[in-house]
Image (tube, grey):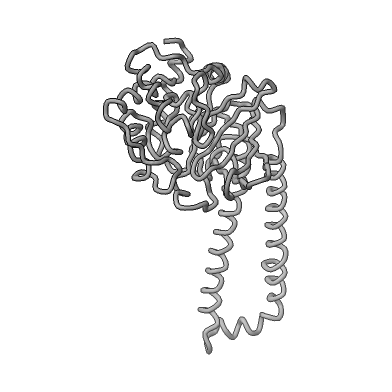
């Protein structure tokens, strides 16, 4: 096993183990998310301090102003002398300082999220569907364009440009540890960018309610060292290899004669469907059905057999395939590395 394939295997195992880790938007792993996290922490801390101080002052004021107490009479005598000072200090000066600092941090965050500081390493078109993500790595040579689904690979330390649009309804693209939310709108292209400062697997999701399976419209961003990213690109550009195993060859025939080829494409075969995800390198992906299932043989069999029982309302019909043909089909799909 070559070094990059060994590294790739390690990342896949790590990602499988961490697929259900909650998304934490308060810890950034890139310049965009880190800037947003700093602004978020500032606002949370300041808001907490203000609420605590105001609550304490209300309690103290209420206790000291009880009728007939010495404190109440003293406050009445000194209110005219010190009251205006507290009004100016607590009602004008301190809020003004907080707002100015918040405004400055907001401008810095907007600058960090507006555009990368250098040319992007890749331009990626992400198209939202109900309920999955189509991913295309755009290349000046159309033959070099990479198509995958629900996974975005990026090189560590290099920005990538994300072009977002929708094929149906409004979605929202969010990978909280790498960048903030960006709307995904039919007929419009919105631009975002990602940069990871450390290798890892970062979970994302659709955050605009888009229908029945909105909660099961996830994706992952896999940040790899630049050499591993280049190797991944080279592997993804290749067409699917012709199966050499007799069972896998029989599975390809099943794929082409069943309804699979009507909806899905596999480069290097006669399957040219555009309704569902491109399956050319299906076996290299971490999940099935946009993060709903781990990519295992058993889960793939269940998805092919009755996807509606797993993710009701999706476009995958219930398939009627003989058990022997299903096993051959699974053997073929497992070769699509």
Tell me: residue 94, above or below residue 204.
below
Residue at 58 percent of width and 62 percent of height: 50
Viewer-side residue, 50 vs 335: 335
Viewer-side residue, 198 vs 289: 289
Q: Quadrant of the C terminus?
A: top left
Left or right: where does residue 46 sit relative to residue 331? right
Left or right: where does residue 329 sit relative to residue 185? left
**Which x, y percent locates residue 270?**
50, 22
Tell me: residue 169, above or below residue 322.
below
Name the outermost residue toward the left: 323
Name the outermost residue toward the bottom: 68
**Which x, y percent locates residue 235?**
52, 17
Name the outermost residue toward the front: 257
Q: Quadrant of residue 286?
A: top left
Viewer-side residue, 183 vs 31: 183
Viewer-side residue, 328 vs 134: 328
Residue at 58 percent of width and 30 percent of height: 197
């Amino acid at each position: 096993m070559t070094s990059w394939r060994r590294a790739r295997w390690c990342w896949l195992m790590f990602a499988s183990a961490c697929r259900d880790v909650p998304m934490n938007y308060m810890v950034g792993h890139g310049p965009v998310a880190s800037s947003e996290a700093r602004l978020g922490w500032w606002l949370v801390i300041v808001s907490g301090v203000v609420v605590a101080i105001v609550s304490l002052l209300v309690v103290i004021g209420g206790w000291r102003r009880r009728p007939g107490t010495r404190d109440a009479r003293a406050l009445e005598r000194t209110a005219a002398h010190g009251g205006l000072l507290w009004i100016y200090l607590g009602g004008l000066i301190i809020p003004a300082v907080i707002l100015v600092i918040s405004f400055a941090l907001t401008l810095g965050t907007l600058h960090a999220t507006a555009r990368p500081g250098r040319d992007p390493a890749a331009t990626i078109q992400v198209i939202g569907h109900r309920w999955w993500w189509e991913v295309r790595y755009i290349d000046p040579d159309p033959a070099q364009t990479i198509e995958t689904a629900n996974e975005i690979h990026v090189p560590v330390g290099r920005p990538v440009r994300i072009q977002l649009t929708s094929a149906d309804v409004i979605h929202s693209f969010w990978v909280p540890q790498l960048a903030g939310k960006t709307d995904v709108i039919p007929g419009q292209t919105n631009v975002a960018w990602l940069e990871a400062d450390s290798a890892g697997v970062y979970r994302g999701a659709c955050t605009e309610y888009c229908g029945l399976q909105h909660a099961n419209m996830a994706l992952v961003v896999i940040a790899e060292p630049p050499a591993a990213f280049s190797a991944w690109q080279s592997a993804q550009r290749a067409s699917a290899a012709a199966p050499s195993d007799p069972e896998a060859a029989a599975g390809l025939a099943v794929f082409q004669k069943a309804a699979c080829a009507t909806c899905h494409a596999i480069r290097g075969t006669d399957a040219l469907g555009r309704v569902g995800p491109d399956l050319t390198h299906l076996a290299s992906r971490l999940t099935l059905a946009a993060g709903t299932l781990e990519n295992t043989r058993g889960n793939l069999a269940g998805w092919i057999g009755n996807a509606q029982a797993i993710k009701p309302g999706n476009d995958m019909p219930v398939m009627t395939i003989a058990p022997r043909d299903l096993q051959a089909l699974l053997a073929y799909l497992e070769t699509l590395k």
